[in-house]
Image (cartoon, rainbow, N blue to C red):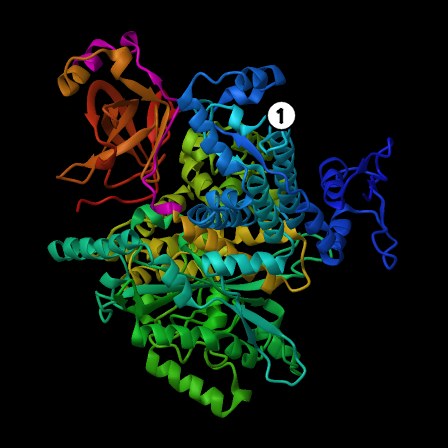
Amino acid sequence: MSSFICPLCTTNRDFVNFFKLFRHITLYHQSDPNFEIKCDLHNTCGVFYKKYSAYKSHVYRKHSTELHSSANGNTSIDAISIDNSQLNNFDTTTATEFANDDESTESTDACDETDSILSNDNDAISYFSSDRNEEIVGSIKDIKNSFVMFILQLREEFLLPKNVTNIISTYITSLINHIEILLQEKTFDFSGNSPLSASLIPRSDFGKCIDFNQLKLVFDDVCNGIELITKNEYQFTKYCEEYFNFTSPLEIPVSSVPGDTDCGYFIPIDNSLSSMLESQQFSDEILENIHQKQTITELDKDLMFSIRDSYHGLGLDDNHLLIQLYIDDIGLTNPLGSKRDRHKMSMVYFTLEDIPEKYRSKLDFIQLVAICESRILKQICFVTCLEYIRTFGLFEDPVKATNFFRPIIDNLNELQLNGLMINNTLYKFTFSTVVGDNLAANWLGGFQTCFSNGHFCRRCYIDYKDQSLLIPLSQIKLRTMFDHDLIVQQILNDPNRSPVKGVVGQSPLHSLIGFHPTTSLPADCMHDLLEGICPIVMMSLLKEASSKRLITHGRIQERTTNFQYGYFDCANRPPPIQTKHLQNERIVATAAQKLCLFKTFPFIFWDIVDRLESFIVYKILREILDLVLSYPFRTSWLSVLDDLCDAFHHLMLIHFPNKIVPKIHFVREYGRVVRDYGPATRHWCFRYEASHAYYKKLSIRTNNFKNTPKMLATHFRFKQCYKFSRFSPLRNTCYPVGVKTVRNSSLNKEMRDLVFNHFGCFDFEENLFQCRKLINENIEYRQSAVYVMGLRDTDEQPSFAQLVFILRTSEKWWLLVDSLETKSFDEDLFAWEIKSVDRYSLMDPCQLKYWHKGLDIYHVKGSSFVSFTARLTLY
């Protein structure tokens, strides 16, 4: 018999066949730091391998015959007793006792039956085959399916690189091989030549038995399946295609020039919609949400919930689902240094506008449509006129942009014309709007992308030099579809005339059904207000306070550093305002952090704001922000919003005339924006920009910039396969944190009486539980937080309650709250003063209707205040 010696062992351990040698190397040497082995199975080999993965690939590729033949060479039949623990410690003495025991005829007959089954190879095969083999095949497929999903989760949710998933797969196969060795040590031979013959063992001492060779085959199938899944990207993709209907992103050739390889990648919208609406529960919730909003607006026509209730939504079909697009550029490298924006991508997303409120904050419902490098779409043509470039910005070649958007347009037009059949239900769709920042919206609409000269606004014909004049908004001519089309036709007839009144050319989306540059590009309050005007006003107020010697730069930094934010505001805690920020007049923070700073600004500087004459600018802007962020919005508020916007423009000219920027003019138009498109929070970029983090993290983890658009689009398709196969967002989310029993002494008399009156008499410490935090329907409830319980009928003043206990009985969670007294509204702090009056009540978590976010309590001048940025209304 041939002998195989392990060259990696110091003892020169030998093995009877190559399979056992290879298994030994896999178990004990694959992680050796000095792994080095020479393959000498054939004369043609003789190659040294310094990595186990390379050696394994060589063996599977060149010596699979020797590997499998030696693995199947052992024909002895071993059995494992699954249920009987006595056989684990079986010894010769016990076997002799069984051999001398012939008193029980029933036991002898049972042993004879077992012996007749196990002594015949054919019978043994038939015993473990037929239905059992089919069951094993099915279970192996399920294991592969589950393992592919596991790898998808590691790759796309936890963003682990490929080498890490390969290490995990290798460890799992090694663990299975270890288990196989341990089980083999527990086996005993039932062949006729064995002293432990099955005929000597009573049937009653057997549990369920399995042929060890069959068990090895199962282990081998599992290991082979795991190794094949993570062998390479091609194999993994094939398994995703088989189990999760994975399809690769489509390549979009964006250039018509022969030899130009520039391209983008496109994920068909109908594929994403099919996966999203495959869940009947989710589809029903969307339709129910549309019907519910329609019912409310029919009863109160003053309410606006979406674009359906706005001026541009009058022609929308109530039975159609609305598709909203988003476009933006993201930088995937460090924004500092010489490689800044080197890998800048143009991203196109979409979402359904009719998604219920409890799902809108989830990024799983924002889907990637297309991706392309920004340098390709916005490639600059040669322009000889330097003054033209300096005045109106760089002129861009529209051909590649048109080619890039063509498949998106065709896909959307097909959906709007023919709909989509899902689960025997025909869904109809309608395009609504394209959202984005001003730069992206102007570029996509065919307007000039320079905001420092000319007609910079895409909604009216205001000139840059007129923005500092007190011109009533009603006297500025609005852009109309008819006028815009005439201007575009003039430019197409004579391209040298571009731009004309701020228009530089035809929009790449001009052939999209329902799209027009003057009606389909709403304003974005996140960029206009949160990242634009709010930081300007705050920085101007601080500069004025410093110039009046009310506070120094150092004290400003100290206050913004040491201010104690509440629990909910801590999630968006802004960085401190440093001296260099004041000198540069720029606040470095995210939009959410700037909103948090703007809201808490009067609390941080409560002792100086009332001494600033220009603080009236903050007050007016705060009222504008509260109206703009309101949901739902009332049409009767539009006149109030118009007056506030005009007053804000006038006050900026008085107090901060050198801070007049184009976004000041954009704020003036928000009355028209809400009237034309509905509540501003339905078409802002807040959640869309949160989706950028996935692609930025992915590019950092993979460090792959060879074909970045394809890599990102492919990974997103894998992520879709994982998300929609589980559809976790639709699971009933009721997640308590810190559950413990309630002690009778922790409740005062009023609380105990309330609990007994509501639930009846019971043992507190056995039947009543409490938790520190509860996540119910994606809403977080936390002890000591304040919530809006309702609105007063007369003046819509909010009523507040502080959460004291979160109680559970009979598998149902309840909120024990302290109803607070609303004393007054402080116009300097823009906050409601509250006071506890020890008036307790129990409420269902699902009763919150008007404002679902928890509020933090801030203490100023001996009083308690809560603040939020919205205006609430009864409905």
Front residue (pair 620, 293) = 293
For the N terminus, the quadrant is top right
Q: Amino acid at mark 1?
A: Pro
The image shows residue 867 at horizontal and vertical percentages of 34, 35
Q: Is residue 415 visible?
A: yes
The image shows residue 304 at horizontal and vertical percentages of 23, 56
In this picture, is 395 found above or below 269?
below
The image shows residue 356 at horizontal and vertical percentages of 29, 51
Q: Which residues are magenta?
A: 728-753
Res. 222 image quadrant = top right
Mark 1, secondary structure of its residue: loop
Q: Residue at x 82, y 44 (%)?
A: 2
Q: Is residue 484 left or right of residue 164?
A: left
The furthest residue to the top: 745
Q: Residue at x 30, y 48 (%)?
A: 357
Q: Residue at x 33, y 77 (%)?
A: 480
Res. 861 image quadrant = top left
In this picture, is 737 found above or below 394?
above
Q: Which residue is mark 1?
A: 195
